[in-house]
Amino acid sequence: MSDVGDERLADVLASLGMSTPCPVVNRPVLEANLSRMADEISAKRVALRPHFKTHKSVQIAQMQADRGAAGFSCGTVGEAECLADSGFDDLFVAYPLWVDGNADRLRHLQTRARVRVGVDSVESAERLGSVVRGGLPLDIVIEVDCGLHRTGVPSGGVLPIAQAAEKSGLHVAGAFTYGGHAYTAAGAAVKAGHDEQQALLEARDALISGGFEVDVLSAGSTPTALLSAGGVVNEERPGVYVFNDRQQVEIGSCADSAVALCVAATVVSTAIPGQFVVDAGSKALSSDRLPWMQGFGNVGVRTDLVVDSLWEHHGVVKGSGGIGDARVGDIVAIRPNHVCSVVNLFDEYAITDDAGCSERWPVSARGLNS
Amino acid sequence: MSDVGDERLADVLASLGMSTPCPVVNRPVLEANLSRMADEISAKRVALRPHFKTHKSVQIAQMQADRGAAGFSCGTVGEAECLADSGFDDLFVAYPLWVDGNADRLRHLQTRARVRVGVDSVESAERLGSVVRGGLPLDIVIEVDCGLHRTGVPSGGVLPIAQAAEKSGLHVAGAFTYGGHAYTAAGAAVKAGHDEQQALLEARDALISGGFEVDVLSAGSTPTALLSAGGVVNEERPGVYVFNDRQQVEIGSCADSAVALCVAATVVSTAIPGQFVVDAGSKALSSDRLPWMQGFGNVGVRTDLVVDSLWEHHGVVKGSGGIGDARVGDIVAIRPNHVCSVVNLFDEYAITDDAGCSERWPVSARGLNS
């Protein structure tokens, strides 16, 4: 194999009978990531409610529960159903859910887990209330916008929603926010973490002024989780930290050595000079790319060797320092930009440890995106 | 429902018990697209070998076969296996395949179908030869680069590969190319179609000069298929034409009315003024976006109402002409940029016709990307 190839990765796939492209997880790095976040959040006396959407794996959820996770955050009812199927019983659909065709699913989910749902409008609160009326009690958490300007009301605007929710028979548990503007540039997480704290402080005060008790003040992303935890914020919902990815490295949120997942790919063409082509394209790496990033992934820890362009089954790799002596048939490790979108494209992980033991784990909630 | 909502789409999902986000196919438009391409390619006395990677549906493959498709093109061995499982027996893996852990799969596939495989290097030809030695005969087709500069050798460089393949016991069937530079701008397809013809003409001459018989000269993409068909080119491999998408409309490859698939999505938030948020994010629409395109899809046929930014479960829609009176709970039809990547994210289609009949069809080869 050439200087860009990874003999060990090739052995892992061969031992498991898996073909490229394939997501490969370094288990010791995964476990270190899980323990570090659990310990550091715990030291701040804040609940860790990891986001399931990143790994969608009930095995990894169990590892998080074993390290003290207070429950799980989900992006969809489908993800929550998957966790409930495996016995996890404290679930937050951290999303401004509109309940319609999925009403029966939500009611059934409530019979198996304590369920919290996000809302950011009077209409959706009233809708939720009418759907669960006469059934089990439902907690709602009001989404506030702390600067991302995606979803959520201004902190000062929580009261009408809380009042509508209460009138509809729902229990108002508190407020949540997401400081996703942490991803706008390296270093942006400090302000985003502060914004999360400030928005939740204001939301709490507004709710209290309206006579509500506030149990939940939930924030967090991987870059901001340790920055906003504490003070009024009593829950954090990071997701990506389990694996990390190229984005996290580039914004300074983790070390190179904390990236636990790569996509194993095969070099299939060196026909065009100055580049090689791998069999990981957009159906393996996704096309996720923050506006300020170059390319769709990089090879191993060679940050200069970048997936410059993508088709569905082709990733074209170019490097400012040349492409080495890459050869057709080499197995290379690609570090993807955004690991959540990558995992959702695969049915299985290859899991390896330093001792050479390997396993196949299912991506339990693959595609459960509604 | 508001002026951006689609009552009929909501009825389809309700009747099928499906939740948003969900790909919805207009069957009459699909059938018209299938028939039009079949008729026009046939009129040029050229074989149509549609690419399976777009729809990954054995039902739609059967509709293509019923309209005279000569066989199918696939991106991966997994897609070819899926087609063979349903009895389709003339399959071209139109990809410079490196055979390693997948060798047994290729040999087994050969027992069920006539299989052709792409190559663009001496090394991969020799490898293929060693893998199938003593087994069933294998056709290879040499990939030539006609200007996309992704994979493929220059047309003049086919002979060493053909000779290595023959020496390795493989049968050299011809050459193929892909004029993907048709997507660089509106109108670029004319040159790309010409480039496909020219590259295959040169490849044919080079192969004949080396004493090879040439059966297959295969080109094509949806924008170029009807432009390069005929003359030396005797096979076309378009994929996207079955559904079309926003890209095809924007490059002028199809009419608005020829787009057969939308992603049904629910408006979940109108909390931030000047935008609304749907539950179709990157895990439903993919993040595919040609460099010159704005956003990640548009709403219905309102080209100004664009999915401006994406997270995994959030699509933020903005419009130069305002966002209408969008309301939480509206079901909207999103036209995605690139339909192939969208289909791969879902397990099922909703299929509808003008008479109000609806069905669920599986995405048979969803995720079979290796």
Image (cartoon, coloured by chain):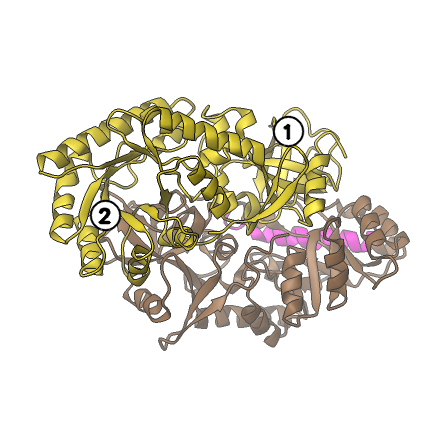
Chain colours: A brown, B yellow
Q: Horizontal and vertical percent for residue B211?
A: 9, 38
Q: Quadrant of residue A78?
A: bottom right
Residue occupied by mark 1: B319
Query: Given this view, does label 1 or label 2 mark the residue nearer the observer?
Result: 2
Q: Which residues are magenta?
A: A185-206
| Chain of the residue that carries numbered disc 1 in the rendered image | B
Q: Horizontal and vertical percent for residue A361?
A: 48, 68
Mark 2 Cα shell of 10 Å, populated few (<14), some (14-19), many (≥20): some
Mark 1 / mark 2, whichever is N-terminal: 2
Residue occupied by mark 2: B139
Please tell me whether mark 2 sits on a helix, a strand or a loop.
strand
For residue A171, above or below residue B290: below
Rendered residue at 82%/45% (across/down): A122
Residue A91 seen in the current view: yes
For badge 1, the amino acid type reads Gly
Q: Horizontal and vertical percent for residue A185?
A: 51, 46
Rendered residue at 63%/74% (across/down): A68
Do circles 1 and 2 both sit on a common chain? Answer: yes
Residue B58 horizontal side relative to residue B323, left or right: left
Residue A49 horizontal side relative to residue B284, left or right: right
Asked if residue A190 is among those painted magenta in the image, a careful observer would answer: yes
Please tell me whether mark 1 sits on a helix, a strand or a loop.
strand
